[in-house]
Image (tube, grey):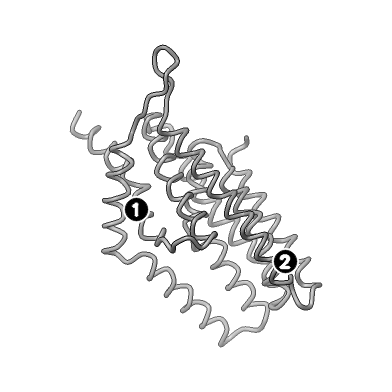
Amino acid sequence: MMIGLGTIVNAAVVVAGGVAGSFIKNGLPQRFKNIIMQGVGLSVLFIGISGALQGIYKVADGGKLDRQYIMTMIFSLVLGGIIGELLDIENKLEKMGSWIQSRFMKSGGNVAEGFVTASLVFCVGAMAIVGSIEDGLTGNATTLLAKSILDCVTSVVFAASMGIGVALSALTVLIYQGSITLLAGFIKPWLADAVVTQVSLVGSILIMAIGTNLLEFKRIKVGNLLPGVLIPFVYYIITVAIGK
């Protein structure tokens, strides 16, 4: 699959959903929105589980399955969670979004409000970051394609009340997610395949957490766990430096 395709599709469906939603007066009925969100939540959860299993298991001699990177996964999530909690990433992201939105809502009209609100919802989240990194490192855009479905529904609902400005947020999605994907692709040649697999594994665990949040099982502060994705990078750099 072409690297960056997930972001392109994501931006395209935001435009389509925003345009479609601007012609709908009352938005989607709540019962349709609920069942669609549940369907997407189950899909995201399954994507996370399958990605995690793919990263953990390898075929050993004799065709048996052997586990790998278990300790790396645990260490990354625990240490990353501690770092994220100390930095209070989740709360800061929410506060930043509220601040930006309030500034634009004071000075702008419906177009500005729709653009800023939708941009924040589509970009300030773990799914956009993890999905973009995964796309850049492995060329797997499955996470971003699942996010595209979610964003399409959301853009229809938003545009029904805030207008065509929601469709313009596709530009933000394109620049934000595209930049992360390009950066991940740029550093990939300097990384060992094992590091890419470990990053993807930790990212898949976070995707699972996003799925549980969408299904409203238990609220997990995924934002505070985001530093865990960087732990395999840091560990690899340290080991390379020590080796030299």
Q: How many marks?
A: 2
Q: Which mark is residue 29?
A: none
| Quadrant that contains the N terminus | top right
Q: Observer-nearest residue: 175 or 224?
A: 224
Residue at image location 65% in from the left, 49% down from the top: 8
| Image quarter of residue 41 | bottom right
User: What secondary structure is marked by label 2?
Assistant: helix
Left or right: 84 in relation to 180: left
Q: Observer-nearest residue: 182 or 90?
A: 90
What residue would you read off at disc 1?
A: 227
Q: Position of residue 205 (x, y in %)?
A: 43, 46
**Mark 1: few/some/many CA within 10 Å (<14, 14-19, 20+):** many
Residue 144 visible, this angle: yes
Q: Position of residue 65 (x, y in %)?
A: 42, 23
Left or right: 39 in relation to 46: right
Q: Position of residue 95 (x, y in %)?
A: 42, 75
Left or right: 231 in relation to 128: left
Q: Earlier in the sequence, mark 2 or mark 1?
A: 2
Q: Observer-nearest residue: 186 or 154?
A: 154
| Image quarter of residue 30 | bottom right
| Quadrant that contains the C terminus | top left
How far apart are the two marked residues, 2 and 1, measured between alpha carbons? 32 Å
User: What secondary structure is marked by label 1?
Assistant: helix
| Image quarter of residue 122 | bottom right
Residue type at tag 2: Gly
Q: Is residue 56 above or below residue 19?
A: above
Q: Is residue 62 above or below residue 108?
A: above
Residue type at tag 1: Pro
Q: Which mark is residue 18?
A: 2
Residue at image location 30% in from the left, 52% down from the top: 80
